[in-house]
Image: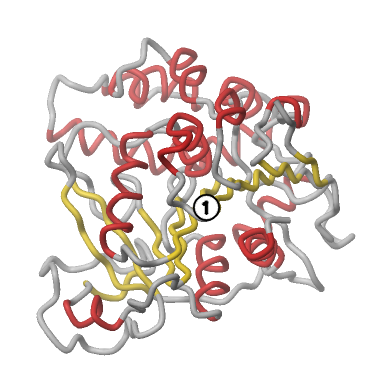
Amino acid sequence: MPFSKLDASACPVPSWLPGGHLQTIHASLFARHHRIAFVRDRVDTPDKDFVDFDWAGPGLFPHKPPAGPQAESAPLQAGASAAARWITLGDWQALPQEPGAPALILFHGLEGSSGSNYAQSIAAHFRSRGWVVVVAHFRSCSGTPNRLARAYHSGDSTDIAFMLDTVRRRLPRARWHAAGISLGGNALLKFLGEQEHEAGWLTACAGVSVPLDLVAGGAALGWGFVERQIYTRYFLHTMRRKVLEKAERYPGVIDVMGIAHARDLHDFDDTYTAPMHGFRNALDYWAKASSKPWLASVHVPTLVLNARNDPFLPAASLPTPAQCSERVLLHQPEQGGHAGFVVGRFPGNLNWLPERLGRFFETGT
């Protein structure tokens, strides 16, 4: 089988921002980026839950009062995402309907949303170039608790398939692309490998800062002061709150004491994510949900972008060309951090990543 290609070209991270930790943290808190608002579409899932999609594109004006009745009447929670209002029939009619109109669905990372800095920078870049952009929220990440005791996880191919099918039905004549950041990228890449030729309607895809080997990534986040005291505490703060809220609605289903005393992601996944989603324990979940073993089966042109100094995944665990199909382009710059890739003068900006995605989607390189 022909191997994939490896791009080792640099992301021009500035000298004033050294190291993977600083590059990761600065990107999430301080780097400049354009901001964009969305209109929201809520879609019920086959298991009687719902998924929220935030749309932007030519013809959509999120801050303009809707011309007709909105799809939902429930208020949107300010600050939970970047959705300004619910979508209307007029909004659907305003979106490009011509064959081949470029469109991008973006899957966010762990506890992310359409308001995340990376989602904002990517959406603004492609929207300014006439693309339709939709951010698909994993369950419980759009600002509204989902209806079920379950939530989302790194290998949820069923939800990825549902979300892809939903946007394809909304704009069936568009030329669809897909990108996933971190957890969202892992779920997307796993889906592409499992589906092989059935995902061929997608023009091209990308996974960015993907924890391709969840066992290695989980171990990395379980060691070190910064990993445990900053990243782990940040994620556990919101995930613990959401799960304890679920426990009040579903008494006896969730190990409340285990969640309350979870010290790291292994404890959390061992107590909640794994048993709630059909895995034996955290290690079983991490092993089965990892996307790295599926890269050899990917048949859609796909960029897999990982900085070699990403604190969430050791460089030794990154895939080699021999482990991927010929449709995969590996890009592994030395610098960039996790979902960071800050460039420019202080305080830096997030322009490099969307430009890199745009280049791959347009040229395949």
Q: Along the line of sight, which residue is nearer the eye, 209 or 177?
A: 177
Rendered residue at 50%/80% (across/down): 130
Query: Horizontal placement of 108 versus 256: left or right?
Result: right
Q: Which image quadrant: the C terminus? A: bottom right
> 187 and 97: which one is in front?
97
Write the residue at 13% across / 66% down: 74
Question: Would residue 33 appear left or right of 4 to someone viewing this image?
Answer: left
Q: Which residue is mark 1?
A: 179
Query: Is the residue 259 above or below the residue 305 in the image?
Result: above
**Local crowd size for mark 1, using a 10 Å CA cut-off: few (<14), some (14–19), many (≥20):** many
Q: Position of residue 114 (x, y in %)?
A: 42, 62
| Horizontal side of residue 100 vs 141, given as left or right | right
When asked about the image quadrant of residue 55, the answer is bottom left
Front-lying residue, 146 or 233? 146
User: Does dot 1 land on a helix, a strand or a loop?
Assistant: strand
Residue 49 figure quarter: top left
Establish if 284 lies above or below 216: above
Residue closest to the far top: 280
- Quarter holding the N terminus? top right
Residue at image location 43% in from the left, 33% down from the top: 195
Where's residue 97, x and y in %? 33, 77
Vertical comparison of 364 with 173: above or below: above
Coordinates of residue 102 in the picture (x, y in percent)? 48, 70
- Rendering colour mode: secondary structure
| 102 left or right, relative to 140 | right
Numbered marks: total: 1
User: 268 and 9: which one is in front?
Assistant: 9
| Percent coordinates x, y for residue 362 in the rendering | 64, 65
Amino acid type assigned to the residue bearing label 1 in the image? Ala
Q: Residue at x 61, y 73 (%)?
A: 33
